[in-house]
């Protein structure tokens, strides 16, 4: 996921203004000020002071630009605007990371306050007619193609944000944006701070659950075993617990995270988004959200969802029938395969039909070795060197930090914050910290996940976790390799948003490659994962894959459906049910309220279809690797040069064509889903 870097990206497009006196050259000293990472502030007051300084600098840049005279130029005026963008993005990036990861709740709240303050001032720039007129006066015809694209994109974003509206409308736009930000912060906070647990009176209730997960949760003083709704525990229980009542209890708790507190928050969030869209001249927020994406319109997004559903449904229904037949051997009267039995039954069938035992597979994957293996893979594929980052400002003792070098030159840095703890972001994402700018800024990113920690005693991972690690690390590499850009607004996260998951989704393929896995997948006895097992894993891979696609399409339809209408009177649960029953083969469970913890509803708004759109692109990109060799360094470096290094300096469609030698096609994904 980018996302929640997606929420951060949305904020990066915002600019801030402050009522401060202009300086002769407000860009002086900017780089030195922004070089320091504020990802581990000493106190709430320290972070608030930093926030004041960032906003003050942005305000001075804004004032200077609004008061500029004489002929408008790219070298002076647009550079000033780019500096404003750079300063704000740095402050927002730091605040976003701190708000989701810092162990101190008071510091997290200070970071959230900083984000909200920044957005509360954004209208001073995003609807500033003096700034827009100044930038629009630059002669674009004399610019190179990449700079012209950046300028054109900025001007289009100004118009999209309502710069051409009357003063009263512009003022209301600013107010509504502020309200959306506050509601989004509350929505995310409620998910992050949810402390739901399921308690069991005896170990017998957890029969079948892997030993390392049981060892992590010994009985407490009350004699009961308490399981939090955290990823390292929830999914092994759903996959392996033999007792249906245990799986159902966990599924119910997991499906009710942040409920009911997020119900009114989400209703208000949708209402404010709809109001914003109408103020900006769009019929719905879905029209606003898709206008600058590759897909273009909500109608095309819906058509894409339906097209994939038509292709995937036959295989999904075939696999579902097999699962129902297998479930009836355990529960003779079963008429459906409920969510809490889905992974369990799939595991049984994979073991019986493909000889792939999930417990045996996970015995080869420990966090420490997976981490080292992925870092070594990065060096092998891209010809770079990954070194420990000494003296990095980590915010928790479990956080690790590394630097990436090429021929002795520092390309970028990354943090790994990979294990769950109270108050931390609960999903998996890459958070940009410094976006990277030639000769000015080293790209820096934090990979935030929730995996078990350690070796074979404590750190066993599901193979799906290995996929997730590759995926999120793909976002990090995208940022790091796009490190020689001339404008801050060309960074990797400025490419069309519905392309943004493609590079990371492509990297999941290496989690299925034997040559890659054999470098780090070793069991406790020291045996390397057998090639025959990996071959069987690949044979079993497509079983249930079309079903998973249908479930993902249901979520995409929920995301689009919530935003493609006037939300007045919208029944959140009813709409979630309608879209689930339309696409997913997994029966809707009225005991749960999954919309309440659907974090992407804030981060991705109407465009959750991005995951499937990016998946289609990834399978298309994979065709060249399949032809030339998935571990072919020359192909990997050509991919890096064509799709990662340019960042957001080129349209996504052009980068895809540069790598493939032809336009993007859905055919590879269609073939995959139709198996």
Image (spheres, helix red, strand yellow):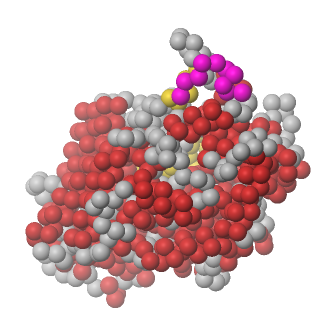
Residue appearing at x 27%, y 69% in the figure: 277
Name the image quarter holding residue 602.
Answer: bottom left
In percent of width and height, residue 592 lies at 49, 44
Q: Would you say residue 487 is visible in this rendering? A: no
Q: Which residues are magenta?
A: 198-207
Q: Position of residue 487 (x, y in %)?
A: 39, 67
Give the image quarter of residue 665: bottom right
**Is there any visible trace of residue 607 in the rendered image?**
yes
Residue lying at the far front in this picture: please name it. Answer: 333
Residue 578 vertical position relative to residue 429 in the rendered view, above or below: below
Instruction: Check if residue 473 falls in the magenta segment.
Output: no
User: Which residue occupies 53% across, 12% down?
Assistant: 222
Query: Percent position (x, y) of residue 274?
Result: 28, 65
Which image quarter is the C terminus in? bottom right
Considering depth in this image, is 382 or 261 the residue closer to the camera? 261
Give the mark count: 0
Residue 64 at x, y = what percent? 16, 64
Point out the residue furthest to the top here: 221
Q: Is residue 410 left or right of residue 455?
A: left
Asked whether 668 or 352 is in front, the reply is 352
Residue situated in front as seen by the camera: 10 or 68: 10
Measuring 50% from the left and 29% from the top, which residue is drawn there?
197
Task: Tell me what residue is drawn at x 51 percent, y 36 percent.
Answer: 253
- State which quadrant residue 74 falls in: bottom left
């Amino acid at each position: 996921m980018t996302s929640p870097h997606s929420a951060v990206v949305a904020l990066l497009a915002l600019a801030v203004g402050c009522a401060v006196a202009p300086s002769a050259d407000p860009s002086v000293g900017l780089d030195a000020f922004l070089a320091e990472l504020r990802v581990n502030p000493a106190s709430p007051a320290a972070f608030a002071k930093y926030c004041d300084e960032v906003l003050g600098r942005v305000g001075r840049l804004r004032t200077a630009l609004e008061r500029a005279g004489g002929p408008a130029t790219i070298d002076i005026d647009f550079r000033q605007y780019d500096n404003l963008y750079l300063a704000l993005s740095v402050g927002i990036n730091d605040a976003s990371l701190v708000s989701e990861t810092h162990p101190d709740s008071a510091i997290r709240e200070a970071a959230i306050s900083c984000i909200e303050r920044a957005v509360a001032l954004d209208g001073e720039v995003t609807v500033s007619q003096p700034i827009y007129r100044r930038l629009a006066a630059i002669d674009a015809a004399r610019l190179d193609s990449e700079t012209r694209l950046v300028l054109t994109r900025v001007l289009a974003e100004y118009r999209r944000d309502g710069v051409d509206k009357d003063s009263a409308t512009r003022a209301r736009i600013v107010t509504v944006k502020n309200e959306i930000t506050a509601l989004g912060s509350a929505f995310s906070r409620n998910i992050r701070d949810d402390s739901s647990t399921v308690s069991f009176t005896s170990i017998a209730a957890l029969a079948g659950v892997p030993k390392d997960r049981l060892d992590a949760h010994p009985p407490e003083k009350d004699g009961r075993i308490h399981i939090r709704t955290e990823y390292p525990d929830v999914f092994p229980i759903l996959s392996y617990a033999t007792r249906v009542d245990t799986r159902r209890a966990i599924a119910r708790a997991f499906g009710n995270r942040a409920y009911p507190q997020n119900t009114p928050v989400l209703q208000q969030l949708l209402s404010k988004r709809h109001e914003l869209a109408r103020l900006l001249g769009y019929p719905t927020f879905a029209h606003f959200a898709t206008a600058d994406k590759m897909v273009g319109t909500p109608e095309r997004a819906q058509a894409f969802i339906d097209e994939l559903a038509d292709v995937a449904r036959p295989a999904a229904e075939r696999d579902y029938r097999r699962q129902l037949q297998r479930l009836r051997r355990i529960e003779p009267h079963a008429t459906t395969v409920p969510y809490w039995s889905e992974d369990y039954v799939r595991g049984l069938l994979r073991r019986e039909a493909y000889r792939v035992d999930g417990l045996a597979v996970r015995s080869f994957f420990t966090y420490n070795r997976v981490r080292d293996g992925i870092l070594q893979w990065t060096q092998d594929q891209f010809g770079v060197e990954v070194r420990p980052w000494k003296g990095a400002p980590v915010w928790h003792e479990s956080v690790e930090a590394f630097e990436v070098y090429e021929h002795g030159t520092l390309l970028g840095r990354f943090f790994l914050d990979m294990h769950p703890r109270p108050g931390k972001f609960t999903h998996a994402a890459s958070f940009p910290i410094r976006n990277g700018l030639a000769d000015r800024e080293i790209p820096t990113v934090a990979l935030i996940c929730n995996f078990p920690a350690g070796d074979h005693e404590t750190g066993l991972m599901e193979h799906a976790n290995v996929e997730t690690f590759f995926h999120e690390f793909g976002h990090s590499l995208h940022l790091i390799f796009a490190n020689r850009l001339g404008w801050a607004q060309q960074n990797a996260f400025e490419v069309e948003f519905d392309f943004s998951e493609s590079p990371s989704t492509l990297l999941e393929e290496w989690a299925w490659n034997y040559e890659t896995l054999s470098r780090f997948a070793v069991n406790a006895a020291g045996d390397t994962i057998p090639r025959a097992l990996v071959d069987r894993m690949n044979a079993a891979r497509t079983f249930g894959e079309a079903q998973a696609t249908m479930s993902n399409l249901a979520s995409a339809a929920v995301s689009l459906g919530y935003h493609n209408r006037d939300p007045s009177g919208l029944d959140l649960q009813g709409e979630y049910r309608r879209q689930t029953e339309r696409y997913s083969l997994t029966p809707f469970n009225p005991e749960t309220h999954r919309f309440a913890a659907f974090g992407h509803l804030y981060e991705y708004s109407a465009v959750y279809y991005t995951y499937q759109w990016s998946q289609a692109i990834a399978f298309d990109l994979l065709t060249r690797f399949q032809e030339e060799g998935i571990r072919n360094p020359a192909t990997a470096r050509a991919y890096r040069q064509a799709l990662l290094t340019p960042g957001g300096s080129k349209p996504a469609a052009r980068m895809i064509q540069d790598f493939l030698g032809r336009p993007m096609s859905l055919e590879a994904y269609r073939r995959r889903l139709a198996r």
